[in-house]
Amino acid sequence: MQQPRTFGKAVQRRQADDFARMRSRYLDIFSQTELRLAQLYLRLGLKKTDSSVGQKIGELVTLKPSHALSKSTTKQIHNICGDLSKQVKIRNGMAHATMSVGTKSSEDVSFFQKANDAAADNPIYFVMSFEDFANAIDAINDITTKLNQILNPPSSPPQPKLAATAGL
């Protein structure tokens, strides 16, 4: 891949600010998801609180159903972990890299290059468009919602009273 092509300084500055806001928003939302994951991790009795997100995911995908954890909830956790693994790659691609803006195929995009790649003059970039950011934000919000549902399951509806069922 070629070096990213940039455009006029004023446009580039505005685009850089817009992309920086999207990056910041994504990382903030990801942090909330990470908090929910840590809460689930601890609630399940997994005590290595200094584990990375990847290590927590690795442990959570090995969970088996038990008397305290239904088969359905176990499957939900496994699915969440699969979705979250993809988001970890996106988060790492943004958080551990420098960002520049430019165009790719006539589309405004942000280019992220990790420090090791930049130091080695290795032209590997992680590329995100505004649409990519919107999709990633939607995906991480969805994961957070699913984690919240597991952490705070809806309470069971109250049982009908005998008199109510007898038509009294």
Image (spheres, helix red, strand yellow):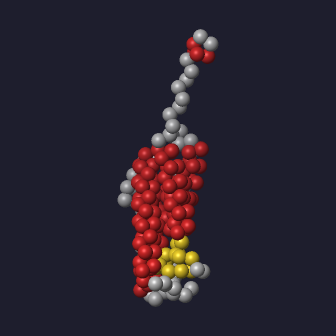
Q: Quadrant of residue 80?
A: bottom right
Q: Is residue 116 visible?
A: no
Count the marks. Answer: 0
Residues 24 and 56: in front is 24
Instruction: Give the farthest residue toward the top.
Output: 168
The image position of residue 22, as x and y in percent, is 45, 66
**In this orientation, which residue lies closer to the viewer: 98 or 119?**
98
Residue appearing at x 58%, y 16% in the figure: 164
Rendering coords of residue 74 (x, y %): 56, 47
Q: Residue at x 62, y 13 (%)?
A: 167
Locate the C terminus and report the quarter of the image it occupies: top right
Q: Name the residue at 55% across, 87% down.
A: 2
Left or right of residue 143, residue 97 in this image: left
| Figure check: 117 above or below 82 | below
- Observer-nearest of 25 and 70: 25
Query: Where is residue 155 shown, x and y percent of the image?
Result: 50, 34
Q: Residue at x 50, y 80 (%)?
A: 102
The answer to which of 163 and 25 lies nearer the viewer is: 25
